[in-house]
Every structure is written in C-alpha cells, then in structure tokens.
Image (cartoon, rainbow, N blue to C red):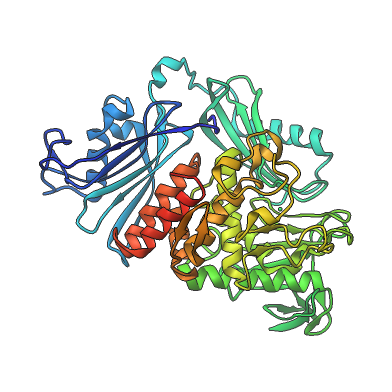
Amino acid sequence: MKLNKKVISSTLALSVALGTFATAGSTVSAQESKIQYSSEYGTPSFIGETWAPKTKKGLSKRDIAFSYLTENSQKFKLKGDMKNHFKVKEENADPGTGTHHFRLVEQYKGIPIFGSESTLALDKSDNVTSFFGEVVPNLDDKNINIDAAISKNEAIEITKEAIEKKIGKVDQYDGPINAEQFIYEHDGTFYNTYLVKASTSNPKVGYWHYFIDAINGNIVDHYNAAQDLSAFGMGVLGTKQLLDVQFIDGLYELRGFSRGKGIITYDQSSGKNVLVTSLSKSFHDGASVDAHGNAMKTYDYFKNTFGRDSVDNKGQQLISAVHVGDKWNNASWNGVQMSYGDGDGITRAFYSAALDVAAHEMAHGVTQHTANLTYRNESGALNESMSDIFGAMVDRDNWLIGENVVVNKDEKIAIRSMSNPAEIVDVRTESGYSPDHWSKRYIGTLDSGGVHINSSINNKAAYLISDGGTHYGVTVKGVGREATEQIYYRALSLYLTQSSNFKMMRQAAIQAATDLYGASSNEVKAVQAAYTAVGID
C-alpha cells in the first residue's frame, strides 16, 4: 500500500430529526457524526456515529457489523455481499465497558489486501459507534492475476537469497520464516504477492519484510522493520536485579518460565545465541542481568496493567540477546527477540541497562500483534511513538527515553524527550531539533520517512494528555499516567490499523477515551486539546 496518504476530513453535523442520515432499515442518532476520507481512494478511513439496524431481533453482533458495512457500501465503493469483501480476523468483547470489537481485513477473491485492516466497534446496546481503516475500491478494474505460479516455499527461498545478498551468509535465522499471500499495491500497481517475514541477529539485526510476486517470483518491494532503536545479579548501573532462572545439570540458566512461555536471555558475543549461565545464583554479566530483569518487569507491566500475556497475548517467549554486534549503538526488536548492543563507550553504552529502552523494544512486539503499524512514514512514526509511550510508562521516573545509555550528556541528554522534544538535537530536521508540532514535521525520505523523527509529535501529545501544559497557545489539563496508558493501549489494540496516520491516531485516542471515561469526560477533552496543541485536528 502507499503509506504517505493524506486524509481529507469531512465532518457532517447531524442536528435534524432522527433517521435523516440513514437509509431504510437503519437508524442513526442525531448526535454529531464524523467521517474522514482517504484522499488516495475516496473511501472512509474513519466514521464516528451511533448506528443500529431498524431491528436487531435475531441478529448476532457479527450480523450487525456486516449490516453496517452493507449500509455504507456505497461510501466504500464496494458492490455485492460484504462477507466477500471483508473477513473477520479477531472478535473481542470488553466486559469492563460492555463494548464489542471486530478487526477485519478487506480481501479480493479470498486474498487479503495488505494494509486494508479495519476496526469496527459496538457499544453495550449493540449500536455501531466507530469504523477505522482503509478500504480499497474497484479492484476488479486492476487486472489482478490471483493464480499463484510459485509456492510459499519458493517465495521463502527467494527472500533468503535476497537477504543474504544484502547482509551476508545467515547461519541461523531467529525463528521460522513465514509467508502469507496478500494483494499489495506498489507504485500504483496491484500485485498478487507473498509477504515473507524473516528475523536475523547476525551478521545484521533485521526483521525483514519481502513482497514476492506470486506470478513470476520478482521482488516487488521490501523493507527492514528492525531499524536504527530466583537468582540475582548486579546490572550495568549497579542496580540489583532479581532473576527468574532454571537450575539444570549443575548450572543456573537465564531462562525462567513463571511468566508466559518463558523469558530467556542469550549472549551473542560469538555471533550466535548462547544461553547465559552461572555456577552460582549470582550472575555477573551486567548487560545480561539487565536484559533479563527488564524483560521480566516489562512482562509484568503489560500483564498487571492491561491483562496482556506477553507481546502476542498468548504468552510468547521473551527472548533477549546481549553483546550484539561490534560496539553496536542500538537496540532492536526483530519480530522474534530483543537485541542489545554494548554501545561504542563514547556516545552510547549498554542499551540493555535502560528499562525504558527494553520496554520500548518489547512494545514493538505488542504493536506487531495488534495494529501492526507499517514501519514507514506516519504509520511508522506512530509505531515508534507507541514504543516510547509504553517505555515511559514502564519506567516512570521521567519522560526521557534512553537517558541511561547516553554517555556524553553535553551532546544529548537522552535519545528522545517526550515532555520537550525540541530539546533533543536532530540534525536531519530543518530546525536541527526533534519536532514538537505537525508544522515542523520531517517530510524527507531518511529514517524510513522519519519514523524516529516524527514520533516525537505524538510523544508530545501523550505527555500533554498525562501531565498537561500549554503548548503553542493551547492549554491542556492533564489526566495522569494511569488514564493515558489505558487510552493508548486501547487505541492500539482495538482501533488503529496498519496504515493509520496521525489524524487516525487522534480519532482512535478520542474513541478509546470515550469508551473508558465517557464522551464528556476530562479524558476526552485532554485528548482533543493535546492533539490540537501539536497541530493534529
């Protein structure tokens, strides 16, 4: 999909009699209804209203959802049975609010369309209250050949060859290499492809995404989503960490299974994952101690705060690898594990020592298994921002990200500042500092379209929602960290989709706050004011 789409907002205020906006067989409340359209396709990317079929008798929640899609089929520019156009990927009930949520994907002749996920929510009375997503119309006109001439295994082999041509021989991939068929738009043409995902730590950290043409085996597009970010032990910074371990054959191992399917820490000094062990209950490699302890703390945060069982909500093992690369100034999530560099000792040092960095990387895993925000342009900036937000929520000391890995404080106090992004130098921007407003966003091609640069705009909004303040003349009354983290988690897990941009982020946060606290709540007002303050209306 093209990922630099602008969104045209069309707000329809309904102040007339009930049913004016509805067609026969449905009702729409007289409260304000909002629609935002994708300028790429002219189809709704957000609809906010209260809608119900004329009668709900005998209809399941899924029936109501598809009735709503049928009701809006003309807006979506789709014809025929909506069950042929949309497939339900997930269906979740929220007993706390009584709401019900669908995550759908648009498909063409049974093949899902990449980036076309949508979310649809019902309130406790089974009224549809919101639609978020991307709908691609008129696919019959695109001359898409759906008959695959190569197999998934062939696509995987093509991908492996391409990866190794790029980074060198890979002796060990970090997990199974998966291939899934998608209709994928690239440079205005729709292709029948396999999306192949592969994770590597050596000779280069990567979470590789390759789109392989299912007709001829050509590489249509590709990108790397891992871009440049009880025993005991003493961490790098002198912090004592309690560690969940195993005792096997006379050795204590940095792997424990009290959380999900386990937390495991490896030493990759040799270029391969080697399990960290000790002859006693005391572990002495500070980088390994921090990585293991911080993974435990992050797991506990998501479990205790949101009831989430690891990054995939199914107990996925949390694997960390330390001493990755040669003085590598970075940390990364590659779809399977966290990788931490030791830093060069001059500007950066031991990324695993920072709890907020560890939480940042694991939050990428949560995003992967929820909205799956594509790692480019605005959706990629939101991906990075979500990781910063949860990094700052796990490590609640301040609103700085990565201050513990920065060696030269005269050059930079932290990797990013959420409270004041503009205090962080970034020579890639026109101002020379991280942007704190939409008008100052980076619009170039570096950093995958500014994923680490423009993330600071959404970071500032999150800070304002929590702590409040006046920014560019707009005053926000903060509602605290507890409400803020719930709003962003709900937006990420229930409303945002692969191709969501900043405008969709605003709407998703408003919808999440409305669900949790009510449409007239201080929380909703804080979200609205915060996004206005950073120039996102």
All told, the count of numbered labels is 0
Question: Measured from the top left, where is residue 475 in percent x and y?
Answer: 46, 59
Residue 365's place in the image compared with 213, above or below, is below
Q: Is residue 179 above or below residue 493?
A: above
Tell which of 201 and 30 is nearer to you. Answer: 30
On the image, the x and y values in percent for residue 314 come to: 51, 61
Please name whichever residue, 118 or 283, is drawn nearer the observer in this view of the structure.
118
Q: Residue furthest front?
A: 473
- In percent of width and height, residue 174 lies at 71, 51
Q: Is residue 73 above or below residue 509?
A: above
Quadrant where the C terminus sits is top left
Does residue 366 show up?
yes
Q: Nearer the viewer, residue 430 or 384?
A: 430
On screen, residue 106 versus residue 422, left or right, reads left
Q: Quadrant of residue 186?
A: top right
* Residue at left offset 77%, top offset 51%: 201
The image shows residue 36 at horizontal and vertical percentages of 37, 36
Does the image show residue 497?
A: no
Query: Which residue sits at x=47%, y=70%?
Result: 480
